[in-house]
Image: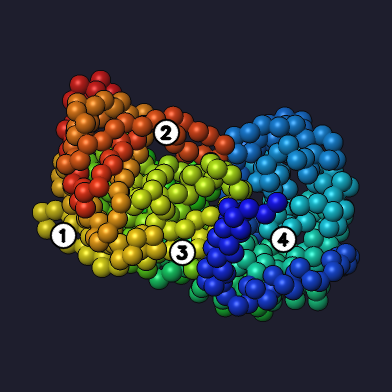
C-alpha cells in the first residue's frame, strides 16, 4: 500500500537527486549511459614483448598487509583468503575486497609470494569479479609492473594477463567518474605503455599521457593542492606523480612521447609537497578535512624523502600564516599553537564524493599534541556511520536546526552546498580569520553563519554569529581521545594534555557528550565533545592554555 509518507520520501529522493545531478559535467552523464548500454567485451590477448630500460626506478614500499600464508590485513581488519570465492566474499566490505585486488602486498617490505598473482589469474577470469573494475585494475597493473621491474623477473603468465587487463582498462576509462579515478587510470596506461613494446602499447602510452597532461592542469590547483581538497587523497596523488616521474626518467628514451612530460611532473611536485606540509600537524600526520584517515596514504615525511631521492628541491621553511587561497584552507601558528581552518567550497563541484559538510571547521594542536580534532573517516559505503562522519556535527563547527551545512547523502553524494564568502585574514599581534557561508539558507531563508577565529600566543577566540531567522544552533568542539576533560561549570571546561592545561569558556552553557574519533579506517576510539546549544544569535568561545610544567619536566 502506497502511503503519503512513502510518496513524500520518494519526492524528496527525486528532488535531492536532481540537485546532485545538476552539478555533473555533461560528459559524465553521457559516459555513464554509454557504459551502462554497451555490452562487455572480453579483452584481447596482446604481444608480450617488453621494452629495454636502463637503471631501475625507485618506488616506496607499501604497508605490510600480508602477514602469513592466506592472511591479509586491510583497514585494520584481518581475514583469511583461501577459496576462490574469497576474492568476492560478501562477508568483507567492498573497500576491503578492493584492497585485496590492488595487490599492494607484492611491493611491501616483506612481499607476499608471487603465486598469489597466479592464483588471481586462475580464479578471476576476465570480467568475472569486482577486481576487473577499472580502479582496482589500474592499481593492480601498476603493482604487478613495479614488482617485475624491481625484481627483474617477467613470468609469462603474468605478462599475458597484464596485456588483457590493460586492454580492458583502455576501453573502460572512468570518464564518468573523473577525479582521482581518472588520474589512476592514466598512470596504469603509462606504466603499461612504457613497460610493453608494441604498437598497442604505444597507443596505451599516448592515451595515458594525454589524460595525464589534461588532469594535471585540472586537478592540481595553483596553490599545489589536489582539487578534491582531502589531504589524504592529495598524498595519494602526490605519490602517483612521484612514481610516474621515477618511471619516465628510466624509460625516457623508450618513446618520443615521454620527454615533454618530465619537466611538467618535476614542476608540480614542490608546491604539492608544500601544500601537504601546510595541511599536516606538528605530529607529522595530515589534518582531517573531508575524507581523511591515517594509514592509507604514505606519511608526509616518506613523500618528502621520496622527492629528495629523485632530486626534487622544495622549500620547507615554516611561516606563521599560510593562506591556500585556491584550496580554501588557512594555517596559522603562534608560539605552541597550530590552527588549521576550512574556508573552502565543496570541491570539485562535479565530483564531491570525498567531501564532508565541514565548512568553517578547524583543528588545533598545541606543540605536537592534537587538541581539537575533526572526527575522521573509518569507512566508505552507504551506512549510518558513514553519513555521521560526513555530517557537520562530526566537525568543529556549527549546525543550525540540526541540519548539515552541505547536503551530504548516500555514501558519496552532495546536493545543496554551502558557499563560503567574505574571507578576511589579518595579521598583527593576533592572527584573525573571518569567513561566512550560506549553507543554512536552504533550510532557513537568508540564514548566514559567520565565524571568526582570533589566535594569540596563549589564546584562541572563536566567535560564531547566525544572521537572520533560525530555530537553534549547536557548536561542536571535538577533543582528542588522549585528553582529560572535566566541567568546572556549564560555561567552563578544563582540559589537560601531556604538556598543557587548557580552559574552555563560552557565553552559552554547554555539556560533555561521549563520541568517537576515527583516525584510521576500521578504527573507532571513544572521545568527548563539548557541545553548546542555544537560540542566541551569537556564540563567543575562549580557549586559553598554559604549559603543564610538571608533566613537561617529567617527560
> What distance separates the C-alpha of mark 3 from that of mark 4?
29 Å
Q: Position of residue 158 (x, y in %)?
A: 83, 53
Q: What is the number of the mark on residue 515? A: 2
What crowding class fits label 1: few (fewer than 14 Cα within 10 Å), some (14-19), or many (20 or more)? few
Q: What is the number of the mark on residue 339? A: none
Q: What is the number of the mark on residue 427? A: 1
Q: Which residue is mark 4?
A: 134
What crowding class fits label 2: few (fewer than 14 Cα within 10 Å), some (14-19), or many (20 or more)? some
> Which quadrant, please, contains the C terminus?
top left
Residue at 36% x, 41% y is: 373
Give the vertical position of 483 relative to 403 (above or below). Answer: above
* Nearest to N terminus: mark 2 or mark 4: 4
* Nearest to N terminus: mark 1 or mark 3: 3
* Nearest to N terminus: mark 4 or mark 1: 4
User: Who is closer to the viewer here, 269 or 544?
Assistant: 544
Where disc 2 sits, the SS reads strand
Q: Position of residue 354 (x, y in %)?
A: 52, 56
* Nearest to N terminus: mark 3 or mark 2: 3
* Left or right of 357, for residue 496: left
Q: Which residue is mark 3?
A: 416
> What distance separates the C-alpha of mark 2 from that of mark 4?
37 Å
Give the number of callouts: 4
Residue at 39% x, 56% y is: 405
Amino acid at each position: 500500500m502506497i502511503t503519503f509518507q512513502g510518496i513524500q520520501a520518494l519526492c524528496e529522493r527525486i528532488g535531492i537527486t536532481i540537485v546532485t545531478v545538476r552539478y555533473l559535467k555533461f560528459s559524465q552523464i553521457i559516459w555513464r549511459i554509454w557504459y551502462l548500454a554497451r555490452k562487455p567485451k572480453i579483452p584481447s590477448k596482446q604481444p608480450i614483448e617488453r621494452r629495454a630500460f636502463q637503471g631501475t626506478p625507485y618506488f616506496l614500499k607499501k604497508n605490510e598487509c600480508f602477514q602469513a600464508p592466506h592472511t591479509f590485513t586491510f583497514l585494520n581488519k584481518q581475514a583469511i583468503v583461501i577459496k576462490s570465492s574469497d576474492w568476492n566474499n560478501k562477508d568483507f566490505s567492498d573497500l576491503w575486497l578492493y584492497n585485496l585486488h590492488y595487490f599492494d602486498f607484492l611491493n611491501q617490505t616483506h612481499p607476499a609470494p608471487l603465486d598469489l598473482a597466479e592464483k588471481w589469474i586462475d580464479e578471476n577470469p576476465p570480467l568475472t569479479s569486482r577486481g576487473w573494475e577499472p580502479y582496482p585494475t589500474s592499481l593492480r597493473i601498476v603493482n604487478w609492473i613495479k614488482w617485475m621491474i624491481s625484481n627483474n623477473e617477467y613470468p609469462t603468465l603474468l605478462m599475458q594477463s597484464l596485456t588483457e587487463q590493460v586492454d580492458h582498462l583502455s576501453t573502460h576509462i572512468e570518464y564518468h567518474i573523473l577525479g582521482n579515478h581518472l588520474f589512476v587510470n592514466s598512470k596504469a596506461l603509462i606504466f603499461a605503455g612504457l613497460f610493453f613494446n608494441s604498437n598497442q602499447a604505444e597507443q596505451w602510452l599516448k592515451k595515458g599521457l594525454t589524460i595525464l597532461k589534461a588532469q594535471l592542469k585540472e586537478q592540481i590547483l595553483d596553490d599545489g593542492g589536489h582539487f578534491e581538497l582531502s589531504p589524504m587523497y592529495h598524498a595519494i596523488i602526490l605519490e602517483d606523480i612521484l612514481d610516474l616521474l621515477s618511471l619516465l626518467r628510466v624509460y625516457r628514451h623508450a618513446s618520443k612521447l615521454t620527454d615533454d612530460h618530465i619537466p611538467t611532473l618535476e614542476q608540480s611536485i614542490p608546491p604539492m609537497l608544500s601544500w601537504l606540509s601546510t595541511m599536516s600537524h606538528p605530529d607529522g600526520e595530515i589534518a582531517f578535512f573531508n575524507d581523511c584517515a591515517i594509514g592509507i596514504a604514505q606519511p608526509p615525511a616518506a613523500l618528502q624523502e621520496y622527492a629528495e631521492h629523485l632530486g626534487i628541491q622544495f622549500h620547507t621553511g615554516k611561516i606563521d600564516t599560510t593562506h591556500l587561497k585556491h584550496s580554501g584552507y588557512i594555517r596559522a601558528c603562534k608560539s605552541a599553537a597550530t590552527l588549521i581552518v576550512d574556508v573552502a567550497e565543496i570541491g570539485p563541484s562535479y565530483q564531491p564524493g570525498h567531501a564532508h559538510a565541514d565548512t568553517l571547521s578547524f583543528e588545533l594542536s598545541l606543540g605536537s599534541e592534537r587538541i581539537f580534532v575533526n572526527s575522521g573517516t573509518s569507512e566508505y559505503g552507504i551506512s549510518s556511520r558513514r553519513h555521521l562522519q560526513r555530517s557537520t556535527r562530526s566537525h568543529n563547527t556549527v549546525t543550525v536546526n540540526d541540519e548539515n551545512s552541505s547536503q551530504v547523502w548516500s555514501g558519496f553524494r552532495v546536493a545543496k552546498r554551502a558557499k563560503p564568502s567574505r574571507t578576511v585574514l589579518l595579521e598583527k599581534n593576533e592572527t584573525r580569520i573571518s569567513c561566512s557561508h550560506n549553507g543554512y539558507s536552504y533550510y532557513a531563508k537568508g540564514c548566514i553563519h559567520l565565524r571568526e577565529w582570533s589566535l594569540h600566543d596563549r589564546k584562541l577566540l572563536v566567535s560564531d554569529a547566525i544572521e537572520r531567522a533560525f530555530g537553534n544552533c549547536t557548536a561542536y568542539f571535538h577533543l582528542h581521545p588522549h585528553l582529560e576533560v572535566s566541567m568546572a561549570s556549564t560555561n567552563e571546561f578544563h582540559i589537560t594534555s601531556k604538556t598543557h592545561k587548557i580552559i574552555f569558556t563560552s557565553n552559552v552553557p554547554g555539556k560533555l557528550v561521549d563520541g568517537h574519533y576515527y583516525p584510521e579506517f576500521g578504527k573507532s576510539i571513544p572521545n568527548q565533545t563539548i557541545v553548546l546549544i542555544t537560540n542566541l544569535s551569537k556564540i563567543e568561545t575562549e580557549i586559553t592554555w598554559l604549559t603543564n610544567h610538571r608533566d613537561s619536566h617529567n617527560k
